[in-house]
């Protein structure tokens, strides 16, 4: 098992190099340059060139990429162009907010999605199933910002019971995390329903009934436990995405998370900041996916065997 | 021959454990109604083994699931008839009472051992679960654990392997574990739905021997569902031949293997009727297909495939010919009398 984890951690390195390269190339493709953005349209070409030189932006993109990687290996993520602060500080300062949002969001989504998915499967074609499936279809297809705006309209403007922006107190987290959670809950619901429907029809579930097991235990102990893997995958992946900062939602609710930071960085053509965010997000995502895999092994002995043998 | 009649007499004096009368089962969906079992009747005596034989789709599993009351909830329905177990009707039993019977008094072994076990539970836990559910005399955890070991030993698996998961066992061993689960509470009736079809030929014999041995040891009655006439000859006291949801012939093993008269379908199954000593493993194929259970033929359901088919067979449901417990439902047999 530990050998497997080690192997998985090794994969992080090439993935990271690729991600950084892509960020560099993409940032290079977009028009304009950092100095022009920072100094504004009225600055002289001379001043701009000088600033770009200071940033090292005059060098070819691949050289900059190489320099960046060398620094990163030494634990230096560079300083931002715009604030001249350490990128690491910028990102880690914003991260707790994003983490809180993501954690509340995913918890809500699981707490909503899994039980409703079970009910929809166990009572297939019933009113619960129809309403649940229809609502989840709706939730999965509306854009997040629209949902956010609608919730703001209702709870902040009309009813006036919840704040619509910022992240000063926990109450501020309610609307954004609900907005985040609903679509995720929808996909968890659908995944739970599908895998439960499959699981319920399995022979071993019938064996459990043939033993005289009570229905509740047949469903939870046998069917659900076997249906968990795909649900864990969905929840884990979504959590990984949420950790990357919910760019749109943070924007809608003016929350200073990693997503908003990333967006600011892109707008300012702040290459070190954007790359730093990307590295950070990518790393977290891979850690989360590794945890999901470890959780797999915990749930399913067949996978556990495969890991230990590999 | 003297020995045969003696055992037969013995059997007829035995108490009836399970009596099925006129059982009718359908599967309903939005589009169609599948007539899976159409008014079958048979009895299982105490300590007796009855073989349920027929082609695929004859309604064997459906019959078994009806006895267990495990038909798929929204599609499978018992439309009529009764299933008397020790005199009480299982058809009208509420599910919570049925639950107490399942696994303790009546157990079932399913067709495919590869999928019958929960892949993420240790085999020990799965046997333990059976014991725990019906632990009416409040045995301690330790006592139940002890019993798990006992059961594993009984089916020929080392108790120290109880912490292992199903995927770590071979097909034959899985079926042994399934048998251990089924016999955990020493049921009075064991329904075995093609317990060996999914296994290698060499292992089939082992598993069958084991089942026979345990059945003797525990005085269990058994319904043995099978395609395999060899299995019937080896394990059964009585046989019921099923076709399109009906029992077309029923009798003692001797009646079926050595009797003078047979239903044409049975004849077809055996090819030329062999005797008990001769090796006949597989059912020989009969021309044509089992009728569509959503649209069964009129009269005798076998008539489209019957080589002796007469006009009356197309129009009238055949009467039942019965002699010394040997039942045949066919116009032909009655006419000859
Ligand atoms: N859940 C179901 N829904 C609808 N029809 C079904 C269902 N289960 C079985 N049937 C139909 O009922 C009929 C009897 O099926 P059953 O499984 O009892 O046959 P069987 O004798 O056990 O066959 P096999 O030897 O293949 O196991 C078949 O025509 C089958 O297609
Ligand atoms: Mg079957």
Image (cartoon, coloured by chain):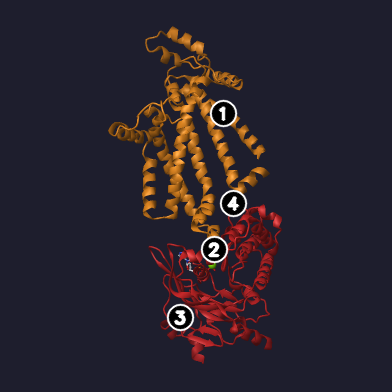
**In this picture, is A79 found above or below A122?**
above
Q: Secondary structure at mark 2?
A: helix
For marks 1 and 2 on the same chain, the one whose residue lies earlier in the sequence: 1
Disc 1 Cβ-to-ligand 1 distance below 8 Å: no
Please report the residue visible at 68 percent of the width from the left and 61 percent of the height from the top.
B152
3 vs 2, front mark: 2
Q: Which mark, by number, is residue A186?
A: none
Inter-mark Cα distance, 3 to 4: 48 Å
Q: Residue at x 60, y 29 (%)?
A: A13
Quick one: B123 or B30, which is closer to the camera? Answer: B123
Q: Ligand 2 closer than 8 Å to the CB at disc 2?
A: no
Q: Are marks 4 and 1 on the same chain?
A: no
Asked if residue A62 lies left or right of residue B317, the reply is: right
- Give SS at disc 4: loop
Give the residue number, with chain letter if any, for mark 3: B300
Can you tell which of label 4 and label 1 is closer to the viewer? 4
Disc 3 from disc 2: Cα separation? 35 Å
Q: Chain of mark 4?
A: B
Check disc 1 and report its element: helix, strand or loop.
helix
Residue occupied by mark 4: B120
Q: Residues within 10 Å of mark 1 (few under 14, many from 20)?
A: some
| Chain drawn in orange | A
Name the mark on residue A16.
1
Q: Nearer the viewer, mark 3 or mark 4?
A: 4
Q: Is residue A133 left or right of residue B235?
A: left
């Amino acid at each position: 098992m530990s050998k497997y984890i080690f192997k998985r951690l090794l994969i992080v390195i090439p993935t990271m190099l690729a991600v950084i390269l892509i960020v560099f190339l993409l940032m290079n493709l977009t028009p304009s340059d950092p100095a022009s953005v920072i100094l504004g349209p009225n600055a002289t070409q001379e001043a701009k060139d000088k600033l770009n030189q200071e940033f090292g932006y005059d060098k070819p993109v691949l050289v900059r990429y190489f320099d960046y990687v060398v620094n990163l290996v030494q634990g230096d993520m560079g300083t931002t162009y715009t604030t001249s602060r350490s990128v690491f500080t910028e990102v880690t300062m914003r991260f707790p907010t994003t983490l809180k949002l993501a954690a509340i969001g995913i918890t809500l989504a699981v707490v909503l999605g899994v039980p409703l998915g079970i009910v929809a499967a166990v009572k297939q074609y019933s009113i619960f199933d129809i309403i649940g499936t229809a609502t989840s279809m709706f939730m999965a297809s509306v854009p997040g910002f629209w949902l956010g705006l609608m919730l703001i309209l209702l709870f902040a403007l009309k009813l006036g019971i919840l704040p619509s922006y910022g992240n000063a107190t926990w109450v501020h987290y309610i609307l954004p995390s609900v907005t985040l959670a609903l679509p995720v809950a929808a996909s968890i619901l659908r995944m739970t329903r599908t895998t439960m429907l499959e699981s319920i029809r399995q022979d071993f579930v019938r064996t459990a009934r043939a033993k005289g097991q009570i229905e509740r235990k047949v469903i939870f102990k046998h069917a659900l436990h076997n249906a968990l893997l795909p649900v864990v995958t969905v929840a884990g992946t979504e959590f990984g995405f949420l950790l990357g900062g919910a760019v749109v939602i943070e924007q809608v609710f003016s929350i200073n998370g990693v997503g908003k930071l990333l967006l600011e960085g892109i707008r300012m053509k702040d290459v070190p900041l954007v790359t730093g965010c990307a590295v950070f997000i990518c790393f977290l995502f891979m850690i989360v996916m590794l945890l999901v895999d470890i959780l797999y092994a915990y749930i399913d002995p067949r996978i556990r065997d495969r890991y230990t043998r590999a | 021959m003297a020995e045969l009649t003696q055992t037969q007499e013995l059997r007829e004096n035995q108490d009836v454990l399970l009596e099925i009368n006129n059982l009718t089962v359908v599967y309903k969906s939005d589009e169609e109604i599948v007539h899976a079992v159409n008014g079958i009747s048979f009895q299982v005596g105490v300590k007796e083994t009855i073989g349920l034989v027929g082609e695929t789709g004859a309604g064997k599993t459906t019959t078994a699931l009806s006895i267990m009351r495990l038909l798929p909830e929204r599609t499978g329905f018992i439309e009529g008839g009764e299933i008397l177990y020790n005199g009480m009707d299982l058809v009208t039993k509420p599910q919570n009472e049925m639950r107490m019977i399942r696994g303790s008094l009546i157990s079932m072994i399913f067709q495919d051992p590869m999928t019958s076990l929960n892949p993420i539970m240790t085999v020990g836990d799965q046997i333990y679960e059976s014991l725990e559910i019906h632990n009416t005399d409040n045995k301690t955890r330790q006592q139940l654990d002890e019993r798990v070991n006992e059961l594993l030993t009984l089916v020929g698996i080392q108790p120290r392997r109880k912490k292992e998961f199903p995927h770590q066992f071979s097909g034959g061993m899985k079926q042994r574990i399934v048998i251990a689960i089924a016999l955990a509470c020493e049921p009075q009736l064991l329904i075995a739905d093609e317990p060996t079809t999914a296994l290698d030929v060499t292992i089939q014999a082992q598993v069958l021997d084991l089942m026979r041995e345990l059945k003797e040891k525990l005085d269990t009655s058994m319904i043995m569902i099978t395609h395999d006439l060899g299995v019937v000859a080896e394990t059964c006291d009585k046989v019921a031949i099923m076709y399109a949801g009906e029992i077309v012939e029923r009798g003692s093993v001797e009646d079926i293997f050595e009797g003078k008269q047979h239903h044409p379908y049975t004849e077809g199954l055996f090819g030329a009727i062999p005797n008990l000593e001769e090796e006949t493993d597989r059912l020989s194929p009969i021309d044509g297909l089992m009728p569509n259970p959503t649209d069964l033929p009129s009269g005798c359901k076998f008539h489209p495939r019957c080589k002796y088919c007469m006009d009356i067979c197309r129009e009238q449901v055949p009467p039942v010919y019965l002699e010394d417990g040997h039942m045949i439902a066919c116009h032909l047999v009655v006419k000859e009398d």
